Image (tube, grey):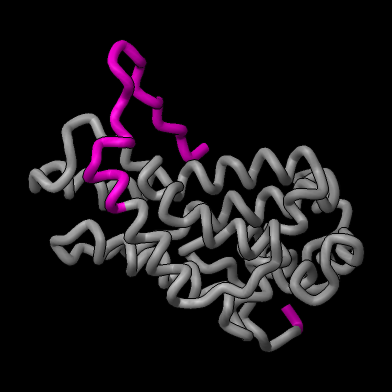
Amino acid sequence: MREDVVAATLAEVTEKGYAGLTVEAVATRSGVHKATLYRRWGGVDGLVADALTASADQPWLLPDTGDLGEDLRRITHEVFAVFTDPDLGPTPTALIAAAQRSDAGATALRAFFAARHDQAAEVAERAVARGELPEGTDGAEVIRAATAPLYYRLFVTGEPLDTLTAERAADAAALAARAGLFTPAPGAAAHPATPSGDHDETNHQAPEAI
């Protein structure tokens, strides 16, 4: 049932945005009675939040090229490719926009990104093990630094996103990490990891890279 409801929510929010998202439409598309949706999800904000939670649970095959810079480039290129793809991009874009419209959605969005950053931190942890990065490097912060410029353009300034921007963001994060900028300051505590707490034929998904 949850899979059907999440798929219906993604389809509805992609097509109609947060303003047009209704429990009734999700009920019709998913085949789940609206009373059940209200009882379990509470309303549209709960539906959006759970769609993000479900997306965070999806596996993410991380690059492992043996070089931090190349791994980060592949991650940022994946973000670029997903959000600029005319078929894939509208769903995560609409879902993130919808999540920012409610407290429940915003909380789920923060948890989603924290889970993804913690998962992708493995890329930096492998670089530490190779001796490419200093001990104590905060891998999640490395990933945030690499991807933040892309999300800034996508959701703040609306500036065009291109492969050069994606590559520069990855390269800048790699340089900063190698310089030790993501290690704890002397006497500071390390940053704690955050726990990862349809009638339409289109397959609406929130791709794994977001």
Residue farthest to the bottom, as pictured: 201
What residue is shown at x 33% (from left), y 69% (from top)? 74
- In this rendering, is residue 67 above or below 30? above
- Which quadrant is home to the N terminus? bottom right
Total of numbered circles in the picture? 0
Residue 25: give x, y in percent of width and height: 87, 68
Image position, residue 11 (x, y; %): 73, 73
Q: Magenta segment range?
A: 174-199
Residue 189 drawn in magenta: yes
| Front-most of residues 114 and 172 | 172
Identify which residue is drawn at 58% across, 66% down: 206
Can you say whether 121 is above or below 201 in the image?
A: above
Q: Is residue 186 above or below residue 119?
A: above
Closer-to-camera residue (12/199): 12
- Residue 31 lies in magenta, yes or no? no
Relative horizontal placement of residue 64, taking residue 114 as reference (left or right)? left
Q: Is residue 142 left or right of residue 129?
A: right
**Residue 119 rendering spot, x and y as whole percentages:** 37, 48
| Residue in view at x 51 percent, y 77 percent | 162
Closer-to-camera residue (35/151)? 151
Residue at the image position 49 percent from the left and 42 percent from the top: 114
Outermost residue, top side: 187
Can you tell which quarter of the image residue 110 is in? top right
Prevailing SS of the magenta stretch: loop
Q: Position of residue 154 (x, y in %)?
A: 64, 64
Spot the residue most to the left. 130
